[in-house]
Image (cartoon, rainbow, N blue to C red):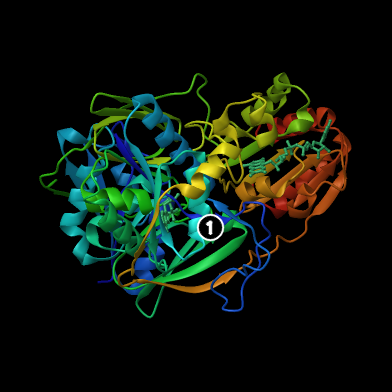
Amino acid sequence: MKIAICLRRVPDTTAKIAIGPSGTSIDETGVKFVPNPYDEYALEAGIALRDAAGTGETVVVAFGGDAVQETMRTALAMGVDRAVHLQGTPSADGLANARVLADHLRDGGYDLILFGKVAVDDYGQQTGAMVAELLGRPCATAITSLVIEGGTAKVTREVEGGVESAHCALPAVFTCDKGLNTPRLPGLKGIMAAKKKPLDIIPTTAGASRVTILSLALPPERQAGRIVGEGAAAVPALMAALTTEAKVL
Amino acid sequence: MADILCVIEQRGGAVRKGANELLTAARQLADQLGGRVDALVCGAGPVSGLDGLGAAGADRVLTATHDGLAQYAPEAIVATVQSIAGQYAAVLVAATATGKDLAPRLAAAIGAPCGMDVTAVHAENGAVRVVRPVYAGKAIQTLEFSGTAVVAVRPGAYPAVVSGKAGAVESIAVPAFTARLTVTGIAAPDKATLDVAEARVVIAGGRGLGEPQHFGLLEELAAAFGGEAAVGASRAVVDVGWIEHGAQVGQTGKTVSPELYIAVGVSGAIQHLAGMRSARTIVAINRDKDAPIFKVADYGIVGDLFEVVPALTAAVKAAKGQ
Ligand SMILES: Cc1cc2nc3c(=O)[nH]c(=O)nc-3n(C[C@H](O)[C@H](O)[C@H](O)COP(=O)(O)OP(=O)(O)OC[C@H]3O[C@@H](n4cnc5c(N)ncnc54)[C@H](O)[C@@H]3O)c2cc1C
Ligand SMILES: Nc1ncnc2c1ncn2[C@@H]1O[C@H](COP(=O)(O)O)[C@@H](O)[C@H]1O
């Protein structure tokens, strides 16, 4: 089984976000970058499937600037076999990025291409399904379970009001959600081994963009509300506010 | 190219709730562009609820029927939209689990950019612009698209506006498609509860509840709202198994924008706020007057939840005439 995992480098989820001078991107000063948390589920799934099969290869692929190499080393340290750095500047247009990834992955002979369900920077929530569509492969997004038997994959995903089950033939594309597995932490041995694993660099350019980021701003501060009172005695005041001011009752 | 296409979600032959909100967004956008709104409903047979689509803002309701559409069948919907997409300035879907699965497929198929989870969409000089939270709601992005765009509108972002108007119903063909993914069904959770992402009112409980069975207090409060309220939770209590993961609100859980969010015994950690700060009205009940949740709450009660919640439940019941 040959498995590709697409990886994105994102700010740590606890990072404080400040807007950069351009007004369209964040100020990266002092921000710690990590592998996208949802990509860790994809990495874990890929590594576990390869290990269960006892044969095959896992490849981590990232499109971005040189800093993604460090992020991919974390994936290699977890146990991925090799890395491909599609070196270039990602576009604001998710479809342009998906085309870059799809072009690279198309002839790679992958049985499985795994993504995170969402990158926690731009919240695009689109790359995996776009790549699948561009490649004409079956796809399920935000999967919380994955079982492969023969050439068939069975998955589940959470939808409003229940859990949806689906199946498809391989080769296939999935995007991974929390709940799929518990990602392993890279051990010292893995970290040492990662330094020697192959990392190929392929200069890449994204195609035309049809998206312009006009602005990035901090969310409006919510009007600091008011304490209507203390204890159960405050309930009538709350009810009055909800009925006459907020009009939500 | 001023017309808007709304792809309406149906399940089991009935239009899903949220369609009317989506049509409000579409109606506003179409009015700005001087175009009309078409609502596309793909199903395996007759779908109930089509009348409501006209009243909610659709000028035309397009039905596309195919046996392969008994369950969610992304390739069939993509093929259908692809056959008509050229006429539209934007294709709108609701940013539900299904809508978020569908939107990027549609975008890739028609070569359009895709904006997910948008909280506002409007036209400026003929171009479609969207506003959307990024960085887990820690920042807000405004994007402009050139050409046809696929836009997934976050549930709760627009109100449903219903008029007396009816839309004309026309049927269109589902073109040939290859079903690559087979959806076999949706298993309902053990308890038939409303999903926090869809409820008009969310009552969220945190570690302050002290014990898992105290979620019962919140269920009683939710019940007082008469089927409009869902019980949510902080991650702290989901991680220890007091309530199922589907109830988690926040950065690694669900993002909700209900009309009313009542946080009970929740401190208001930044990761929790990421999932609920866009609620219309926030109420916090916490015994610590310095809890961060009070900084985002419109109304707060400082006090013991075991005293306040039952009193609130009784008051809501009385207000609802129960
Ligand atoms: C990467 C990452 C992702 C995360 N994602 C999420 C997420 O998606 N969602 C989320 O919620 N958290 C998330 N967290 C966890 C978050 O940081 C907090 O730990 C968590 O939200 C705290 O839950 P809590 O408010 O229930 O508990 P606590 O912080 O312990 O707060 C309990 C509150 O209850 C009050 N209280 C106690 N007893 C009573 C009483 N009798 N009456 C009234 N009030 C009472 C206390 O004053 C206190 O304010 C994440 C953390 C990390 C690091
Ligand atoms: N530049 C990139 N390089 C490689 N993979 C990416 C890149 N951007 C996004 N992805 C993958 O696509 C997923 C979803 O990203 P997004 O569509 O931006 O939310 C991520 O979790 C990654 O798996």
User: What residue sits 31% from the left and 61% below the top?
Assistant: A100
Res B150 quadrant in image: bottom left
Q: Foreground: B287 or B181?
A: B181
Q: Is mark 1 within 8 Å of ligand 2?
A: yes
Q: Foreground: B64 or B60?
A: B64
10 Å crowding of disc 1: few (<14), some (14-19), many (20+): many
* Residue B11 appears in the rendering: yes
User: What residue sits 26% from the left and 45% below the top?
Assistant: B41
Q: How many marks?
A: 1
Q: Foreground: B277 or A53?
A: A53
**Residue A220 image position (x, y, % from top left):** 66, 65
User: Subunit of mark 1?
Assistant: A
**Residue A213 image position (x, y, % from top left):** 47, 72
Q: Foreground: B94 or A140?
A: A140
Left or right? Give the position of A200 relative to B82.
right
**Residue B3 image position (x, y, % from top left):** 27, 66
Image quarter of the N terminus of chain B: bottom left
Res A101 quadrant in image: bottom left
* Residue B157 appears in the rendering: no
Res B106 quadrant in image: bottom left
Dot 1 lies on which element? loop
User: What residue sits 18% from the left and 34% below the top?
Assistant: B68
Image position of B144 with respect to B152: above or below: below
Q: Mark 1 — residue?
A: A121
- Residue type marked 1: Asp
Image quarter of the C terminus of chain B: top right
Left or right? Give the position of A241 relative to B31.
right
Left or right? Give the position of A80 relative to A28.
left
**Residue A57 image position (x, y, % from top left):** 34, 38
Left or right? Give the position of B192 relative to A101.
right
Image position of A148 with respect to B37: above or below: above
